[in-house]
């Protein structure tokens, strides 16, 4: 009984450290902004930082907790971005800023969650490389569909086409083109703020960390460790896989909607929603420590800020960036470097997941 209480208090302390880390960073940034010590360039990165950190948490739920490799999370982000921006555009003149933005975030998450559920029905029957390939294909399909989708609105309602804007047959006097194919959505309200990004990140952390420490979370992790043994004791593998995958898609959709409200023009380009973006999220998860939400946030923050900090180095910027990636990987996974970090009480803070495994042994 005492060991269970100690384990519960340890989990609560670890979760508290993660929440406290995010809140401390938020307070420090807000103080620096109030003092005028944050440049306009860095201010422009605050919302993307929250978006990428939230996406890292979302993907870590699938990769680290469920144990499945997904390369289609940029697709869920794309769905959430367009759903949220679409809602904001059609309600821009009929709703206040806060309720419109709040509902846009919720709608972005719900639409992405629906896509995650529908995609998960056939996809989660696969494992390993096959699952990665199918989710990668899903992300590319979503991006390409958005590039050929035309949606307009007039007095008679919404009009859809996948050929050209002229096929919408809208009333010229009252018609308004919302999604313009490869030109995407233009003029989405700039509702995203650093505070809103931190709130979404905190809610995502609360949901994921509480899921990890719940009965359902333990069932999901048992599937990751040995799905045959989990199925043999009566765990519904399909149900728990769908649960993790859908929750992850909802979080990615919320992050996408936040991202959309920080752009003057939302376009489904490969740079924003292509497979390279999904790979980048996977890099955040791997470098931060698979299964460690705190590590994913730290990795996402460092790797997002680093190219901008090194911009003064011009042509050598990406070289230094690559070297830093290699160093982080060595520090994260090399036994000697991890032993040194453990001696200085740094390993537990950065790479909680690995230490939990050692303690169980």
Image (cartoon, grey):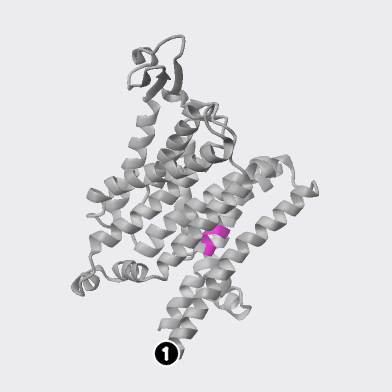
Residue 2 seen in the current view? yes
Decide whether the magenta segment is chiefly helix, strand or loop.
Answer: helix
Is residue 296 magenta-colored? Answer: yes
Residue situated furthest bottom in the rendering: 2
- Can residue 274 be seen here? The reply is no
Mark 1 lies on residue: 1
Q: Position of residue 337 (x, y in %)?
A: 56, 73
Q: Give the range drawn in magenta.
A: 294-298
Q: In this view, does 53 lie to the left or right of 32?
A: left
Relative to residue 324, is residue 207 drawn left or right? left
Residue at 60%, 55% (x, y): give it: 302
Dot 1: element: loop
- Classify 150 as above or below 326: above
Q: Which residue lies furthest to the right in this view?
A: 35
Near-viewer residue (27 or 52): 27
Q: Where is residue 319 in the image (x, y as percent from the top left)?
A: 60, 48
Where residue 343 sits in the image (x, y, percent)? 61, 80
Q: Quadrant of residue 106?
A: top left
Mark 1 surroundings: few (<14), some (14-19) or many (≥20) residues within 10 A: few
Of 9 and 39, nearer the camera is 9
Q: Which quarter of the rendering shows the C terminus?
A: bottom left
Q: Is residue 58 magenta?
A: no
Residue 1 percent location from the top left of the image: 42, 90
Residue 9 versus residue 201 in the image, above or below: below
Q: Which residue is drawn at the image coordinates 50% and 60% (left, top)?
A: 205
x 42%, y 17%: residue: 154
């Amino acid at each position: 009984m005492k060991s269970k209480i100690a384990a519960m208090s340890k989990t609560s302390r670890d979760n508290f450290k993660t929440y406290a880390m995010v809140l401390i960073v938020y307070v420090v940034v807000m103080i620096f902004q109030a003092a005028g010590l944050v440049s306009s360039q860095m201010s422009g990165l605050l919302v993307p930082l929250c978006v990428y950190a939230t996406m890292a948490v979302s993907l870590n739920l699938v990769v680290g907790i469920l144990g499945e490799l997904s390369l289609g999370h940029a697709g869920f982000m794309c769905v959430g971005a367009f759903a949220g921006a679409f809602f904001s555009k059609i309600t821009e003149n009929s709703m206040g800023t806060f309720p419109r933005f709040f509902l846009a975030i919720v709608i972005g998450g719900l639409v992405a969650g629906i896509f995650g559920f529908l995609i998960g029905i056939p996809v989660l029957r696969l494992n390993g490389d096959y699952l990665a390939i199918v989710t990668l294909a899903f992300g590319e399909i979503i991006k390409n569909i958005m590039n050929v989708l035309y949606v307009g609105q007039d007095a008679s309602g919404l009009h859809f086409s996948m050929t050209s804007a002229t096929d919408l047959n809208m009333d010229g006097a009252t018609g308004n083109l919302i999604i313009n194919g490869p030109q995407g959505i233009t003029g989405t309200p700039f509702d995203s703020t650093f505070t809103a990004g931190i709130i979404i990140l905190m809610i995502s952390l609360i949901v994921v960390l509480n899921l990890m420490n719940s009965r359902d979370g333990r069932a999901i992790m048992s599937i990751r460790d040995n799905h045959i043994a989990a199925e043999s004791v009566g765990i519904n593998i399909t149900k728990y896989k769908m649960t993790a995958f859908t929750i992850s898609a909802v979080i990615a959709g919320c992050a996408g909607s936040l991202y959309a409200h920080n752009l003057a023009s939302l376009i489904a380009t490969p740079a924003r929603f292509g497979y390279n973006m999904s790979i980048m999220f996977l890099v955040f998860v791997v470098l931060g420590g698979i299964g460690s939400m705190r590590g994913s946030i730290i990795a996402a923050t460092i790797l997002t800020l680093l190219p901008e900090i090194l911009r003064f180095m011009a042509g050598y910027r990406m070289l230094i960036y690559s070297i830093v990636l290699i160093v982080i990987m060595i520090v994260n996974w090399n036994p000697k470097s991890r032993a040194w970090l453990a001696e200085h009480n740094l390993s537990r803070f950065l790479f909680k997941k690995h230490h939990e495994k050692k303690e169980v042994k």
